[in-house]
Image (spheres, rainbow, N blue to C red):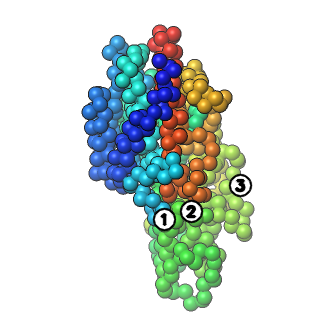
């Protein structure tokens, strides 16, 4: 039967099945801001799976499709998500209508992660149609909170035991064996009375950001022109930045764009200038006057800082950052180091949240099953890698990230287009077919592994 896998994965019937199903769920704009649309896309997916004979379970923020093995409770999971980031402006194609063009399927979620979810369901269909006996059930988990916190996994684990082994089709092939840590911190800095208010927000996984500063005085001196003019709006004592362009050099960073503008134009009091200087150094903007703090911290402990939000409260400037850091770094030492670095800036910090970096502890023999499956499909000999992506594998035990696309630039529609979270996001039919064949072979090999090892 293994000889039939490639034929199944590349048949026109299978291709039509995947395209038709993907078209339906891409048309539902289940963005991180729309709880109703996330419920709708989950309901639609579960309905089509139930119609095909699977056991389905639906909950508030997640659901699952189960191909049940009647002989035991062992489960292998495929962990995907149906929520997507906002489309943003500047698409050449309708983001919520699946477009077929030159072998590409274009639409928000086609690559991240609706397309992979459809491929996973199509892999399960192979085993259902052929009545293949496996030593485990297959649970396709369908989350709706992956892009904005992964609280759906927390809720899932309150009611269910994690599968014995899972893979998340939400990265690149072959197998990602670890992910970096992610922390949220708040830095409090003293400011002068020249800044009445400062507000700003960078939405997680969104192509837009906003910032606004209100001063206690109007600007009586001409403000220098700079390369941010198309984003800067000024009126009397107010400066505002609106950045809706995900292709800009400072994408997601209206806050630091505004800070740079204020700093360069020398319109700040001495105290406020100190606070803004710190923001610029942490945000890696290349400030000429000071050595960049990003470079001074003990690399590779710190990967990057991202300024998430800013506000003024009780005469303090409160700036929230997300920090990605290497998995094996000592987080406490990193924070202690950072606290020392910001003291000269009359600043202090608190840690709001920390998700430690991890090296996945999944059984290496099971991971080898996945690597072997990818090699059989593509002829490419590979090894596991380490990455910066934030997938469900970072929060669900015994899980690795496995595909869905090849480890090469995803830019057939131009730079900054086509990849996950970008304009004109796409998945190619070839990628879907390679992934489908790979996942079927991987499930077969996991079945052989469990049969040979007595379910362990």
Where does the image place residue 138, in percent across and percent down from the top left? 39, 25
Residue 92 vs residue 48: left or right?
Answer: right
What residue is shown with label 3? 295
Q: Secondary structure at mark 1?
A: loop
Residue 229 horizontal/vertical position (percent): 58, 78
Q: Quick one: label 1 or label 3, which is nearer the N terminus?
A: 1
In front of the other: 157 or 335? 157
Q: Which residue does the numbered mark 2 point to in the structure image?
A: 247
Give the label, 1 or 2, closer to the camera.
1
Residue sitting at x 56%, y 62%:
247
Relative to 214, say whether 53 is above or below: above
Q: Nearer the viewer, mark 2 or mark 3?
A: 2
Where residue 122 is drawn, which disc sits there? none
Q: Quadrant of residue 12?
A: top left
Q: Residues within 10 Å of mark 1 (few under 14, many from 20)?
A: some
Residue positioned 51% across, 72% down in the render: 241
Query: Residue sitting at 70 percent across and 48 percent down?
Result: 298
Element carrying mark 2:
loop
- Depth order, front residue of 231/113: 113
| Residue in the image at 71% along x and 55% along y | 295
Does residue 431 appear left or right of residue 141 in this picture? right
Instruction: Give the mark nearer the N terminus: 1 vs 2.
Output: 1
Q: Residues within 10 Å of mark 2 (few under 14, many from 20)?
A: some
Q: Residue furthest front?
A: 12
Residue 11 in sight in this render: yes
Mark 3, other Cα within 10 Å: few <14 / some 14–19 / many ≥20 = some
Q: Nearer the viewer, residue 314 or 127?
A: 127
User: Decide: marks 1, 2 in contact (CB < 8 A)?
Assistant: yes
Check whether the beta carbons of the residues at disc 2 and disc 3 lie within 8 A of each other: no
Q: Quadrant of residue 261?
A: bottom right
Residue identifier under label 1: 90
């Amino acid at each position: 039967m293994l000889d039939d896998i490639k034929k199944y994965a590349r048949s026109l019937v299978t291709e039509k099945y995947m395209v038709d199903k993907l078209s339906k769920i891409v048309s539902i704009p289940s963005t991180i801001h729309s709880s109703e649309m996330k419920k709708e896309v989950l309901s639609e997916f579960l309905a089509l799976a139930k119609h095909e004979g699977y056991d389905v379970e639906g909950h508030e923020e997640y659901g699952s499709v189960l191909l049940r093995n009647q002989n035991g409770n062992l489960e292998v999971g495929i962990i995907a998500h149906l929520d997507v980031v906002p489309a943003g402006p500047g698409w050449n194609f309708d983001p919520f209508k699946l477009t077929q063009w030159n072998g590409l399927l274009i639409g928000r979620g086609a690559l991240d992660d609706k397309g992979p979810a459809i491929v996973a369901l199509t892999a399960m269909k192979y085993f259902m149609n052929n009545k293949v006996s496996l030593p485990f059930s297959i649970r396709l988990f369908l989350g709706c909170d992956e892009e904005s916190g992964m609280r759906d996994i927390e809720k899932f684990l309150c009611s269910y035991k994690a599968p014995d082994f899972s893979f998340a089709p939400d990265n690149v092939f072959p197998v990602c064996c670890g992910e970096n840590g992610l922390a949220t911190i708040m830095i409090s800095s003293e400011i002068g009375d020249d800044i009445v208010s400062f507000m700003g927000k960078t939405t997680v996984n969104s192509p837009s950001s906003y910032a606004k500063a209100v001063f206690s005085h109007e600007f009586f001196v001409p403000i220098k022109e700079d390369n941010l003019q198309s984003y800067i709006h000024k009126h009397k004592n107010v400066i505002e930045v609106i950045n809706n362009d995900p292709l800009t050099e400072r994408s997601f960073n209206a806050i630091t764009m505004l800070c740079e503008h204020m700093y360069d134009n020398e319109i700040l009091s001495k105290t406020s200038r100190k606070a803004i200087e710190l923001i610029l150094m942490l945000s890696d903007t290349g400030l000429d006057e000071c050595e960049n703090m990003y470079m001074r911290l003990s690399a590779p402990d710190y990967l990057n800082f991202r300024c998430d939000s800013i506000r003024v409260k009780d005469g303090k400037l409160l700036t929230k950052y997300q920090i990605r850091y290497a998995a094996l770094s000592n987080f406490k030492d990193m924070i202690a180091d950072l606290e020392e670095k910001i003291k000269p800036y009359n600043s202090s910090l608190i840690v709001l949240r920390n998700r430690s970096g991890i090296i996945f502890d999944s059984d290496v023999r099971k991971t080898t099953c996945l690597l072997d499956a990818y090699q059989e499909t593509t002829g490419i000999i590979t090894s596991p890698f380490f990455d910066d992506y934030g997938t469900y594998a970072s929060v669900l035990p015994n899980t690795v990230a496995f595909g869905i696309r090849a480890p090469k630039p995803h830019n057939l529609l131009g730079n900054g287009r086509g990849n996950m979270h970008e304009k004109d996001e796409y998945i190619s039919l070839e990628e879907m077919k390679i992934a489908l064949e790979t996942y079927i072979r991987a499930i077969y090999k996991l079945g052989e592994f469990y049969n040979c090892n007595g379910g362990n």
